[in-house]
Image (spheres, rainbow, N blue to C red):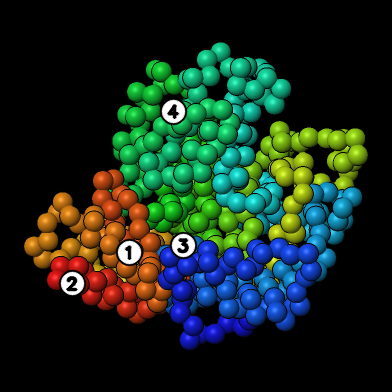
């Protein structure tokens, strides 16, 4: 099952065909089959429908095949199948997670005394960040949020979270699960490059103060639609005035703060109360690999739950499970550690820089093209655009982008994605793997142009 560069990027098959191919795999029978037969089934029935993230034609999402050093660590983690919730179940695993988290705090230049916990996804990291913010707000109002919950607030309907209107949908998940409801999420306008517009923010907050209690502000360091990095210092200043928690959702973009030329975009990161990050994106480590950082190590104490047989109170050994759920967690720290040690930071930065340069080069080449409408100047490794054939009716452009996207995905030779910016459907190109070059993305642009012509004929 080794990588084969001549394979299509994926089958392009519709759901009905994929389901039919996979049915034999879930035909659970009384007697088992040989590994040889099982291997053939997997190769014939499943692998054609899996995405080739390592191909230069993969331009759609944030996925990445495991890097060699990460694969080495992942194999050890699989072999030993360690749960690393606490010292009882894995002394080495629990300690390595603790040490890795603190080393990453230093690597990203976070506030002294900061700490980290590994999680299953950036969605869960954002959810925990909002829980910590609520708990912090409750403490200032004189009660323990973990005991009283929302009913401890005089008027829970006043509670609000502010974030960019391009912020990740996981914030909606978070306010739903925390019982706040989507009405508690107040969005801020963005500028032409899809960052929070700091010039409009103060007026919005002034209007908000009269009727809402903002307990958390979220800056997105690399939005999922456009890769834009919200300005952190103005949000930090607003949080100081409001007495609010500042969370930075860096699930996608935080890694790029390690690239010297891009580091200024992340100015103020050390001011955040919490930061989320997904190493399984650009770092090429196996899923799941997400982290939540907090500015003050003691902030994690708000998550602690003790048991009589598990994580008993008063023990001095490291227990990562006291800092975040769930009570069984994979050894996600090991592949990240082995990857960083194998590559070295110099190579890591070089690999991160390549897709960023590819998108910047692409944007420069396309900005003068008459049939291409760029939707923003890219901050990181994402570029959104529309193909606009001469004389094509404006009211049908969104439909054109959608049909082109569907056709590219059905061909199976490359991938692209689609998103909505305000009221416009746009095409979206993502470069995560260092194998993606400006030339490989320009080939996708040529494909878009060809399909636009076919649509009109």
Q: Dot 1 corresponds to which residue?
A: 405
Check disc 3 and report its element: helix, strand or loop. helix
Q: Dot 4 corresponds to which residue?
A: 183
Estimate the spatial distance between the alpha carbons at disc 3 and disc 1, rounded to whole Å.
17 Å
Mark carried by residue 453:
2
Estimate the spatial distance between the alpha carbons at disc 4 and disc 2, rounded to whole Å.
43 Å
Q: Residue furthest left?
A: 391
Instruction: Kindly identify the residue that appears in the image at 71 percent across and 33 percent down.
Output: 302
Estimate the spatial distance between the alpha carbons at disc 3 and disc 4, rounded to whole Å.
35 Å
Tell me which numbered mark, 3 or 4, is placed earlier along the sequence: 3
Q: Where is residue 445 in the image (x, y as percent from the top left)?
A: 29, 73
Q: Do the residues labelled 3 and 4 touch (CB within 8 Å)?
A: no
Check disc 4 and report its element: helix, strand or loop. helix
Q: Residues within 10 Å of mark 2 (few under 14, many from 20)?
A: few
Tell me which numbered mark, 1 or 2, is placed earlier along the sequence: 1
Q: Residue 139 vs residue 241: left or right?
A: right
Q: Are marks 1 and 2 in contact (CB under 8 Å)?
A: no
Estimate the spatial distance between the alpha carbons at disc 1 and disc 2, rounded to whole Å.
14 Å
Tell me which numbered mark, 4 or 2, is placed earlier along the sequence: 4
Tell me which numbered mark, 1 or 4, is placed earlier along the sequence: 4
Decide: is 457 above or below 166.
below
Q: Dot 3 corresponds to which residue?
A: 15
Instruction: Kindly identify the residue that appears in the image at 8 percent across and 62 percent down.
Output: 391
Name the image quarter holding the N terminus. bottom right
Mark carried by residue 302:
none
Image quadrant in which you'd find residue 337? bottom right
Q: Do the residues labelled 3 and 1 touch (CB within 8 Å)?
A: no
Check disc 1 and report its element: helix, strand or loop. helix
Q: Residue furthest front?
A: 30
Instruction: Evaluate whether residue 63 shows in this view.
Output: no
Q: Position of residue 313 (x, y in %)?
A: 87, 35
């Amino acid at each position: 099952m080794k990588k084969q560069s001549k394979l299509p990027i994926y089958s392009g098959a519709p759901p009905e065909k994929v389901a039919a191919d996979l049915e034999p795999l879930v035909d659970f029978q009384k007697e088992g089959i040989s590994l040889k037969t099982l291997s053939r089934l997997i190769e014939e029935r499943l692998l054609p429908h899996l995405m080739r993230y390592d191909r230069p034609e993969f331009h759609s999402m944030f996925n990445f095949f495991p890097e060699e050093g990460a694969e080495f660590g992942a194999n050890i983690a699989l072999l030993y199948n360690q749960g690393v919730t606490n010292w009882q179940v894995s002394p080495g695993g629990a300690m390595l997670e603790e040490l890795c988290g603190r080393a990453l705090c230093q690597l990203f230049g976070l506030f002294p005394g900061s700490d980290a916990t590994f999680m299953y996804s950036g969605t869960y990291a954002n959810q925990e960040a909002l829980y910590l913010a609520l708990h912090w707000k409750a403490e200032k109002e004189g009660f323990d949020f973990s005991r009283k919950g929302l009913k401890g607030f005089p008027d829970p309907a006043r509670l609000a979270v502010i974030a960019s209107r391009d912020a990740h949908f996981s914030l909606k998940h978070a306010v739903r699960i925390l019982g706040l409801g989507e009405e508690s999420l107040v969005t801020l306008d963005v500028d032409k490059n899809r960052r929070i517009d700091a010039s409009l923010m103060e007026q919005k907050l002034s209007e908000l103060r009269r009727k809402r209690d903002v307990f958390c502000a979220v800056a997105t360091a690399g939005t999922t639609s456009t890769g834009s990095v919200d300005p952190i210092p103005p949000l930090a200043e607003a949080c100081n005035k409001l007495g609010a928690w500042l969370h930075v959702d860096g699930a996608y973009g935080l890694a790029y703060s390690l690239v010297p030329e891009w580091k200024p975009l992340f100015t103020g990161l050390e001011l955040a109360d919490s930061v989320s990050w997904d190493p399984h994106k650009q770092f090429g480590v196996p899923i799941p690999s997400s982290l939540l950082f907090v500015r003050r190590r003691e902030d994690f104490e708000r998550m602690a739950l003790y048991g009589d047989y598990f994580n008993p109170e008063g023990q001095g050994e490291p227990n990562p499970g006291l800092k975040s759920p769930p009570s069984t967690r994979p050894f996600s720290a090991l592949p990240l550690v082995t990857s960083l040690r194998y590559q070295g930071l110099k190579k890591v930065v070089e690999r991160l820089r390549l897709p960023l340069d590819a998108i910047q080069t692409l944007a420069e080449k396309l900005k003068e093209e008459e049939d291409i409408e760029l939707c923003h100047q890219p901050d990181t490794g994402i570029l959104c655009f529309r193909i606009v054939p001469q004389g094509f009716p404006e009211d049908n452009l969104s439909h054109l982008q959608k049909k082109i996207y569907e056709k590219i995905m059905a061909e199976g030779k490359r991938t692209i994605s689609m998103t909505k910016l305000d009221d416009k459907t746009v095409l979206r190109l993502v470069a995560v793997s260092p194998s993606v070059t400006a030339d490989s993305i320009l080939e996708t642009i040529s494909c878009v142009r060809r399909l636009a012509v076919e649509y009109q004929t």
